[in-house]
Image: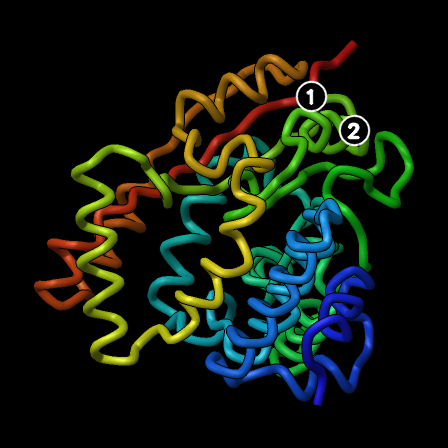
């Protein structure tokens, strides 16, 4: 078992120790206590936290139970997503796709199913293992790499499409990341970035989130909420889009960093589908809206 300064060391090292990952997955209460102790040591000792290592550590811990990938999504919903992407692409040819922050591989799996050549990259080794497992279960060939969304390990002008889902809000340097995505795209290549207003600071949204969290805690549907707060609470001020993300702001981010023909898709088809599957309390309290930002690398 790992406690105090030992866990702090593991967090600094990005939780690369396989035994550490296995021993800390799937037990939110244990994870919460250990992560809290690690952060406590970091702050009391006056040591600056490496945000990326903290983020990687959190998603390593979450990887064993995270279901925002192939698990928990039925074929009907996947069909809705595929239709949206097909409508958003100007070509029907086979594309070379890079999924940044692939997580459990939701987008990577979808595009591979659609017949494209897909590469996935993620900061979390635990999530990469889950993505590989999902791809193997589905009989799909996808190349997965450990890497940083803000410093990609790929050559210039290599991909036709760069995608990411629920990544923008957790970036420490979003401008740097967007420029990296543009760098690895071929001229005329596209970017698809999906995100949501998860932490909208407006009072009405805060109240809804609080009620929803208490309901989750009471029903024990999402025991990882407290772990998330312990991990992201100390670093949220270092993440520019944590509370400041919106379709307009995200679209401006891409335009400001050289993308052209940017557009906003509010993903009403996906949101309506999700609402049709939610309980009444979820429809009332689950007020987060998601959106898709697309842009194109200019052809010189």
Q: Residue furthest left?
A: 280
From the top left corner, tell me how far across and down residue 247 is, in percent: 40, 28
Task: Identify the residue position indicated by label 2 in the image.
Answer: 186
Residue at 65% x, 66% y: name it.
38
Q: Where 196 falls versus 261 (above or below)? A: below
Q: CA distance from mark 1 to mark 2?
A: 7 Å
> In which quadrant is the N terminus drawn?
bottom right
Residue found at x 40% / y 21%: 248
Q: Quadrant of residue 297?
A: top right
Q: Earlier in the sequence, mark 1 or mark 2?
A: 2
- Callout 1–callout 2 Cβ contact below 8 Å: yes
Q: Is residue 242 left or right of residue 170?
A: left
Q: How is the image coloured?
A: rainbow
Among all residues in the image, which is located at the extreme right? 155
Where's residue 226, x and y in %? 41, 66
Q: From this viewpoint, is residue 40 visible?
A: yes
Residue 51, compared with residue 248, is above or below; it is: below
What residue is disc 1 on? 297
Q: Nearer the viewer, residue 156 or 46?
A: 46
Q: Nearer the viewer, residue 295 or 205?
A: 205
Tally the numbered discs: 2
């Amino acid at each position: 078992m790992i406690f105090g300064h030992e866990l702090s060391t593991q967090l600094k090292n990005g939780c690369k120790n396989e035994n550490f990952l296995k021993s800390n997955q799937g037990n939110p209460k244990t994870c919460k206590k250990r992560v809290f102790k690690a952060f406590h040591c970091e702050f009391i000792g006056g040591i600056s936290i490496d945000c990326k290592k903290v983020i990687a550590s959190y998603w390593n811990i979450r990887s064993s139970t995270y279901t925002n990938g192939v698990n928990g999504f039925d074929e009907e919903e996947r069909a809705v997503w595929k239709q949206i992407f097909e409508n958003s692409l100007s070509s029907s040819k086979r594309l070379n796709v890079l999924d940044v922050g692939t997580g459990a591989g939701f987008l990577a799996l979808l595009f591979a199913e659609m017949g494209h050549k897909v590469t996935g990259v993620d900061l979390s080794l635990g999530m990469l293992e889950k993505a590989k497992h999902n791809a193997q279960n589905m009989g799909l060939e996808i190349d997965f790499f450990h890497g940083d969304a803000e410093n990609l390990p790929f050559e210039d002008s290599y991909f036709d499409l760069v995608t990411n889902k629920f990544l923008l809000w957790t970036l420490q340097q979003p401008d740097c990341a967007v420029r990296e995505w543009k760098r690895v795209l071929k001229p005329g290549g596209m970017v698809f970035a999906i995100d949501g207003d998860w932490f909208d600071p407006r009072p009405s949204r805060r109240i809804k989130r609080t009620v929803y969290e208490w309901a989750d805690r009471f029903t024990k549907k999402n025991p990882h909420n407290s772990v998330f707060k312990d991990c992201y609470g100390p670093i949220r001020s270092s993440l520019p889009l944590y509370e400041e993300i919106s379709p307009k702001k995200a679209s401006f981010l891409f335009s400001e960093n050289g993308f052209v023909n940017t557009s906003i898709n509010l993903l009403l088809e996906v949101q309506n589908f999700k609402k049709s599957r939610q309980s009444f309390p979820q429809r009332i309290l689950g007020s987060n809206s998601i959106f898709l930002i697309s842009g194109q690398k200019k052809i010189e």
